[in-house]
Amino acid sequence: DRAETAFKQFIELCPNQSLGYRELALLYIRADTKLSEAVKLAKKAVGLEPTAENYFILGCACRKTDDKQAALAAVQKAIELAPNNLEYKKMYELIRHDR
């Protein structure tokens, strides 16, 4: 609860920085809660800063909500931006083999 509150406060103070949105999305993904909100937050992070890390978090959030196509597209974009990142490639393969 404290982490969630802190990230929400960070978003209020710095609404144009992707960090708060990304980290709050990641918190929800890890806790396996508020997953549709995690997708919205990750999309906001990507909109503010289209980095590989933000796309990766978006892909993870989409995977958690069973949106396989969106998850694959987001992680593929992360791989394009950071082609040497093995974690992104592993996640892409995991999503590909999800049923």
Image (cartoon, grey):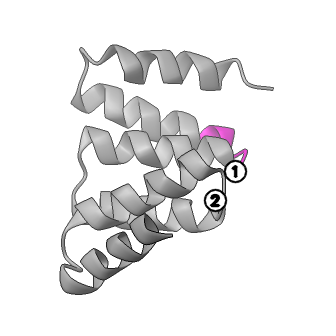
Identify residue type, mark 1.
Answer: Thr
Q: Tell me the element at label 1.
A: loop
Residue at point 40% right, 24% down?
88
User: Is the C-beta separation of discs 1 and 2 under 8 Å?
Assistant: yes
Q: Nearer the viewer, residue 53 or 2?
A: 2
Graded by Cα atoms within 10 Å as few (under 14), some (14 to 19) or many (20 or more), the crowding at tag 2 reads many
Identify residue type, mark 2.
Answer: Leu
Asked if the magenta segment contains residue 50, the reply would be no
Highlighted magenta segment, given as a residue range: 65-69
- Rendered view: 1 above or below 53: below
Q: Position of residue 39 (x, y in %)?
A: 54, 60
Q: Tell me the element at label 2.
A: helix
Q: Which residue is mark 2?
A: 35
Q: Quadrant of residue 49?
A: bottom left
- Predominant SS along the magenta part: loop
Quadrant housing the C terminus:
top right
Residue at point 44% right, 34% down?
75
Q: Position of residue 68 (x, y in %)?
A: 67, 38
Q: Quadrant of residue 77?
A: top left
Residue at point 24% right, 14% down?
84
CA distance for labels 1 and 2: 6 Å
- Rendered view: 76 above or below 30: above
